[in-house]
Amino acid sequence: EPEVTQTPSHQVTQMGQEVILRCVPISNHLYFYWYRQILGQKVEFLVSFYNNEISEKSEIFDDQFSVERPDGSNFTLKIRSTKLEDSAMYFCASRDRGMAAEAFFGQGTRLTVV
Amino acid sequence: SQQGEEDPQALSIQEGENATMNCSYKTSINNLQWYRQNSGRGLVHLILIRSNEREKHSGRLRVTLDTSKKSSSLLITASRAADTASYFCATDANDYKLSFGAGTTVTVRA
């Protein structure tokens, strides 16, 4: 069964360092998303990506964040200068179409900023 | 905000009992989805109900939707220990944003 894969599963980084979280969405999907979940809290929308550009982003997704689809298969989230409060689980998701389609989630990357 | 809000926040039941959780949302929707999350894992889609549907079943899951009250409920019948997880409702604002509620944590005791 096709699945969304994320790497690494766990990343520890020092405050101020850049991190890149990687995702391989399902191959025929067109819509891509990043979410984050601070431990025990709600799943927060960060950004969506369609047709090779950002389609929507939340207020959390500030200038420290960027997304790329560098090679037509990978989908990355970069945090330029990490802060302690960026510590969270980051989930990538994809859908084959937009509204009313099931979203497929990866298993997440646990980011710990120390 | 389009986000759903679940109620209760947490639920503890005995194996074999039914679990019911509710979701309320603020604006008009085209559909509402329910997802499940096992501890520390990714979300898994359970069921989608469209705005013109009132009830939908999938195995031991039953979802209702009342658009006049802007609310939905998820019922898990004959619960099992393996149903222990967090359950989230989600609404589509558009093609580009699926918004999740705060979730209900369900614990099924053996």
Image (cartoon, coloured by chain):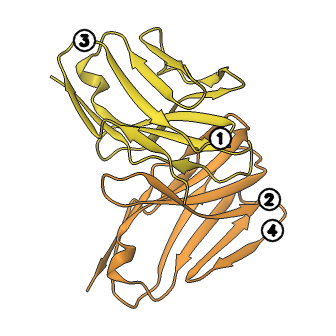
Mark 3 or 4: the one toward you: 3
Q: Nearer the viewer, residue B66 or B45?
A: B45
Q: Which residue corresponds to mark 1?
A: B2
Q: Residues within 10 Å of mark 2 (few under 14, many from 20)?
A: some
Q: Which residue corresponds to mark 3?
A: A17
Tell me, by letter, which chain the rendering colours orange. Answer: B
Callouts 3 and 2 in the same chain: no
Say which amino acid is labelled 2.
Answer: Ser
Say whether marks 3 and 2 touch (CB < 8 Å).
no
Which chain letter goes with mark 4? B
Say whether marks 2 and 4 touch (CB < 8 Å).
yes
Q: Which residue corresponds to mark 2?
A: B51
Q: Is residue B1 visible?
A: no
A80 with respect to A1 (left or right): left
Callouts 1 and 2 in the same chain: yes
Examine the rendered structure and indicate whether residue B97 appears above or below residue B81.
above
Which chain letter goes with mark 3? A
Examine the image and state in which quarter residue B47 appears: bottom right
Q: Which residue corresponds to mark 4?
A: B53
B15 with respect to A26 (left or right): left
Question: At x 46% / y 89%, what residue is drawn?
Answer: B78
